[in-house]
Image: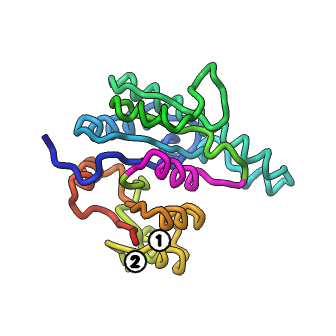
Amino acid sequence: MVELKYKRILLKLSGEVMGGENGFGINVDEAEAIAQRVKEVHQMGVEVAIVIGAGNLWRGKQGLEHGMDRATADYMGMLATVMNALALMDALERANVMTRVMTAIEMRAIAEPYIRRRAMRHLDKGRVVIFGAGTGNPFFSTDTAAALRATEIEANVVIKATKVDGVYDSDPKKNPNAVKFDNLNYIDVLNRRLQVMDPTAITHCMENHIPLLVLNLWDETALGKALMGEKIGTLISG
């Protein structure tokens, strides 16, 4: 049996990861690639919950620039996260991983309503749980939803999955001299205004002592190594 550093994780995915090269729409190949990563760690005995964004389907900022009501734009984004959650659930179940989608906004015909104890029961039974519709409230990001759900389900860590191998002091794609951090504390992230997650999510993790690990999900070995305790990516903690 593999010795795990983290038994229960909350995996935070941006919506763009579902969109393929251009970052828009739902690319089934990308959904299957993510499902394969999740399956690999699930088979290690890790309990996996997921929060996914909606940037591949809807960007509320565009609506706001045209005068759209903020709450309306946010609710549209919440609905888009459910579409992504269903696509990822389908990819996981085709990979023979039992999965449940739970939503903060009730839509019983397609998903279960979010109930904390039920979510934990699913995880105890070895099912992957995908949380859709954010927190169910406008003005809160899916980053904040990830931090909140991680606290509720007693996750050992929030893993922010990116296409970069950690947190840098500047954009490594633009600055070849960018410096990667192996470890940071929450206050450093807030003071440096590092674009890891939004400040509300970082503060929530800090107040509830939930470590945040940033890694490259597209490195085929990174997630598995991190769960076994190897130094991968950037660890943000107290």
Q: Residue at x 74, y 53 (%)?
A: 62
Report whether 63 appears left or right of 38: right
Q: Residue at x 58, y 67 (%)?
A: 199
Residue position marked by numbered label 1 in the rendering: 171
- Establish if 156 lies above or below 209: above
Question: What is the three-letter code of the residue carrying label 1?
Answer: Asp
Residue 177 figure quarter: bottom left
Q: Position of residue 164 (x, y in %)?
A: 39, 60
Q: Which mark is residue 178?
A: 2
Dot 2: few (<14), some (14–19), or many (≥20) neighbours within 10 Å?
Answer: some
Q: Position of residue 200 (x, y in %)?
A: 60, 64
Disc 2, SS = loop
Q: Position of residue 216 (x, y in %)?
A: 36, 55
Disc 1, SS = loop
- The answer for how far apart the CA atoms under marks 2 and 1 are is 7 Å
The magenta-colored residue range is: 139-155
Foreground residue among 161 and 9: 9
Question: What is the three-letter code of the residue carrying label 2?
Answer: Ala
Q: Residue at x 59, y 22 (%)?
A: 110
Q: Residue at x 42, y 60 (%)?
A: 210
Foreground residue among 61 and 236: 236
Dot 1: few (<14), some (14–19), or many (≥20) neighbours within 10 Å?
Answer: some
Mark 2–mark 1 CB contact (< 8 Å): yes
Residue 146 part of the magenta segment: yes
Foreground residue among 32 and 144: 144
Q: Position of residue 238 (x, y in %)?
A: 40, 72
* Mark found first going from the N terminus, 2 or 1: 1
Residue 214 figure quarter: bottom left
